[in-house]
Image: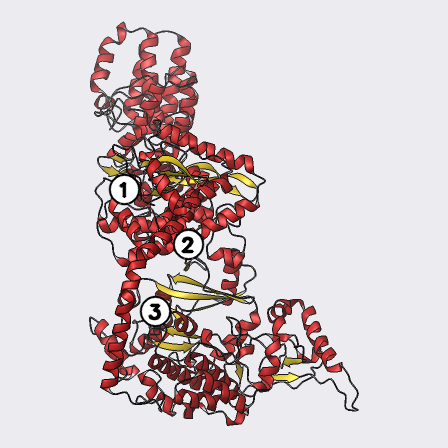
Amino acid sequence: MQDQFLYDSASLLMSADENQGYDETLFLALDKLVRSAKPVDWTVLCPQQHEKLMESRRYLTPPDWRLQWKEYLLSFAVKAGCLRTVQRLMELGADITFPVWNLNELMQDTYSAVSVAIAYDQGPTVKFLIEQLPSPIAPTLLASFLYQAIHHANIKKQTSKDNLSILRYLFERGADPHSVLPQTASKLRAYEYALQRKALDAAVICFEVKPPAELRFKKKHVLQYVAPGLTLAAAKNIVMADVPFTIKCTSMMSDAGFENVHVLEEAPHHEFTWTTLLDCSLQLPLSLRGAVVKAVLDETDFALVDRKERYSRFSLVKDAEGRQSLSITDKATRHAFYDELMLCGRYELDAGPPLHKSSSSVIILATDYQLYPQLFGMYATPQGLDVDGFTKANDHLCYLQPSDTASHATAMFELFQRWDKDHSGELCESEWLRYCSHTFGEKFKVALKLLKRPADYVREMAARRKELSVACVMPLLPTESVEETASALKAYGLVEYSRMLVMPHAARSLYDIFLKERPSHAEIRHAMEQIVSALQNLHSSGIVHGDVKMRKVLRLGKRFRLTDLEAASATGDHALGAKFTTGTLPPECYVRLPTTALDGHATMEAAKAHKRYWCTVWKSETNADEIRGHLTKILPSADLVVVRAFCGDVDMTALPSLPYERVKATPALDLWALGCMLFKLCSTDQSSLLDGNCDEDIATSQYKQALEWTDVDIARRIAAKVVDANARDLIGHLLQVDPTKRLPLDQVLLHAYFKKDSNSAAGGVAESAPTVTMEDLVAKIDMSFNNIMTRVDLVATTVTDEIQKSTAAILAELHLSTTAIAQAVYDASEVKVPTSFILLPVKRGVAHHAEGTTDTILKFIKTISKISKADKPLSWSTAWDCVRGQVDAFAGLKNLLCMQETLYLYLIDDVTGEIAMGEGSIYPLEVTKKTTDYYTFVDKYMPLIQGSFALVDGVDKIARLLGLVGVPKVTGTVVREMKSAIATMEATVTDVVEAATANKSVTGVRGASLRQLDDFFAQHDPQRNFAGLSRVHINGVTQWTVFKDEAREETKACLV
């Protein structure tokens, strides 16, 4: 009805326009049509204007009243969405910007047709009307339209699609979200008006076009307003307007010379937009948070920065309360970061070299972020984790009973009850996670064993299918599937490793304990008792370890456990088909290849058969690496003695025959190896039965001795090396040449050596030791005291001279250190500026928190000590240098340095090794990002910095250094750690000088570097004060000291 009315009205107007005259009848007919078409009287709609029009119509010219009616009809047509009527009215000349009065419920202000179309969400009509306007559209007109679009956005529910399309169309035509709306009382910007009216969808559209000019509105971050309806485009714009880092392009030295790299630098100021977005308390649409992270880090200029570096730096950004991003974000986003930063999305690899690396495997320390939830998922019922599941989960974590008197089950039940706070009989996941964090730490330390050959993995897993006690064998922790692990290793760049085993991190092996902790006889006996029990557990399960030695025994907690079952075999199977250690093999594992045929003639057929077998194996591509690792063990000795080894990964029928019988796997193999271990632990000089390398492998020249052992020879060697009678006896029973005569494990534990009242417990004193009376002891003490006193005077008279001579020698070396570096590395024939200086992250004379300052300095010095320049310029070593052999980790440590906003340069006195203070000195100089090329300075002059730290070596000097920068007291532990780091730098300095001296092809470049150092001092110390240091020459060597001439002559005299 209304559409027809409008169409008829337009037709009447067209007739009137064609008549070009005033027609009273026509006007009354139109008025009647208006009245009849609307349920509300026209005079109610616009009483004042209608009455005024009726009273004065005779005085209006025809164009005036027709024009007024056109705009009214145009507004009604727009409101009703009658596009064809709008088009006809436009043909009549209706003005779309002409304001009409009191349109239905919009009785607030005058409205143009465009405004009415916006108000009633008539998207197609809006586009049609605006397209009729001349281009470009005036900004004030666009701002008016923008105001109407935001003003009429529905604030009670989501804004209609038409309204959003109108907003987008206005922005396409040039509207600006930052434009000030004069219609608002506070002269708000468009997006601010949307936030104020809670038209959040409209605000999001504004942010899709342009980020907010100010990130806070009425003291709240804009993200907190629009979070529920936020889109990816809007979120990305908002975050990119306030990122916590900037990108800097800098030069880094590589094998090919200097190359440009992009690094992250902390932004001087930001409004915590990144952490606000990642905070899980911000209710965002599903999966939007992760999508924004990916868009910002992978689809912007940040993609120029190394992938792991950018993800790592952004994951560590802290919010206003000091909380790290990953600690406040949701689980899905946290895992997204884990996928980028961690192996398999869960293992954070520790910095530093691997724990172990061989031709077949590598062991790396890591932190497992997913173990606790995974164990809960493995053993929890729908109700939670019961006592049985709690016990099984703890077995993986190697948590045993707290005392030996209580049974394991009883201890676990009591522990479960303590953590079952509501006494429900089950632990929920949050209770389990709290228990794990309290008992084992928030994250669990693990050791990742990466294997090259799938066959090693198969053997290990086959041995572990038996019921092995976690108290005896290092358990494997649950991890990802074999396929997922292999894929993750490949994605991580470790393509040569196809399998991975995960175990709890054991602090040390028995080998390390033996070398570094010097265990007592009682401690050795206690360890051996546990090792014997572990072997018993293996043998009772029908498994022969096959490679028992100290490196295969790990201490986890207070218990020793066996590890590495790749060489294990089932009892009765053939042994030595995989790994073995030649120094711990019994005589039956060796054989001499015959050189005489049955007819008595000389022959080398056996040696040829041996070579033919292993050459065939070598040609197999899948086994080449394995044979390469065992090549020296497989080769025959000069006496043609070989190990009875074979390749267990290949079908024997596909290989030539071996010239010897293979050895059967029996417990006797492990018993001999156990005797070798006890021999080394108890020997007076830490020697082995047969001296070998660090892996206990012997040279082929010793194979003949290993084959021809006799019981008499072994007993003689034991008697010569082992003092403890009980230990001698036990070792002798284990190292029997006849395998059947070796003492079984159940009898080993009953041996006198393991009895608590054994003489061994008193330190290994032999039973025949003579009795010593108290009088003898007093006499010996008196004699020793007199001898000491007679020598004290002699020492006192010479000690000063000795100290002076030593000091002179030390100073002579120190004087040459940084000068030698300057001349070797930088080709400086004449050093014109001090070259002994150190960088520290703190400034003297500024109040510091003692503990925090010490930690900051220690961390910084450790970082500096990790830099090596011997092999290639600034090659910084990490675990993956050893694993992959090609990863340059310089960027990681470089960024750690560059995270310091300011470093302070202290000059060092070449003679005293002290920090040069100087009265009224401007030192220390600031090396900041704002005043100099921060990173280039650290990069270029690192050798001098390391050499200068070497001058500060010594407990007193380190303590004084810390005192100068505001740490009056320092613990012995800190000093020892600093000495260790400085000692590392001293070794690096030597390598630097040797490497630089050997390569003189870049002389010009090195000299230029030192000239740049001269420019640096000219810029920061124009008066050439150098903190009171003066240049002196001693024996042709340039030194900088505060002692000037008199000190130069005195020192020179000491050095002559």
Q: Position of residue 168 (x, y in %)?
A: 39, 32
Task: Assign the N terminus to one quadrant of the image.
Answer: top left
In the image, taking residue 1045 as reference, residue 774 lies left or right, namely: left
Type of amino acid under label 2: Thr
Report the residue at 24% width, 47% height from top: 963
Name the quadrant containing residue 928. Answer: top left
Q: Reading the chain from its start, which is encountered first: label 1 or label 2? A: 1
Q: Looking at the image, is 863 positioned above or below residue 743?
A: above
Q: Would you say residue 305 is visible in this rendering?
A: no
Type of amino acid under label 1: Gln
- Residue topped by disc 1: 224
Q: Reading the chain from its start, which is encountered first: label 3 or label 1? A: 1
Residue at disc 2, secondary structure: helix
- Residue topped by disc 2: 984
Spatial CA span between label 3 and label 1: 35 Å
- Residue topped by disc 3: 376
